[in-house]
Image (cartoon, rainbow, N blue to C red):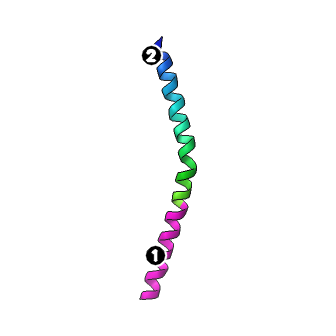
């Protein structure tokens, strides 16, 4: 019985963790893409 409750709580915690981290991942992708594009243009200017 306790194992079943613990499993349910683990699943809920995992779902909450993914929902909470999704916006941060999206922002990191946007910032990462922006930094890569500025690096590329910076290289083009130097050359």
Residue matched to label 1: 39
Q: CA distance from mark 1 to mark 2?
A: 51 Å
Does 27 appear above or below 10? Answer: below
Residue matched to label 2: 3
Q: Residues within 10 Å of mark 2 (few under 14, many from 20)?
A: few
Does 39 appear above or below 10? Answer: below
Q: Residue at x 51, y 32 (%)?
A: 13
- Residue 3 pos. (x, y %): 44, 16
State the image quarter where residue 16 is shown.
top right
In magenta segment, residue 44: yes
- Residue 42 pos. (x, y %): 46, 81
Q: Secondary structure at mark 2?
A: helix
Pick whichever of labels 1 and 2 is earlier in the sequence: 2
- 24 or 36, which lies in front? 24
Tell me the magenta residue range. Answer: 30-47
Q: Quadrant of the C terminus?
A: bottom left
- Residue 29 pos. (x, y %): 52, 59
In magenta segment, residue 14: no
Q: Residue at x 49, y 80 (%)?
A: 41
State the image quarter where residue 43 is shown.
bottom left
Q: Residue at x 51, y 25 (%)?
A: 9
Mark number, residue 11:
none
Q: Residue furthest top?
A: 1
């Amino acid at each position: 019985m306790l194992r079943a409750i613990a499993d349910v709580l683990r699943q809920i915690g995992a779902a909450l963790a993914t929902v909470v981290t999704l916006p941060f991942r999206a922002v990191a992708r946007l910032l990462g893409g922006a930094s890569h594009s500025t690096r590329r243009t910076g290289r083009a200017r130097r050359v």
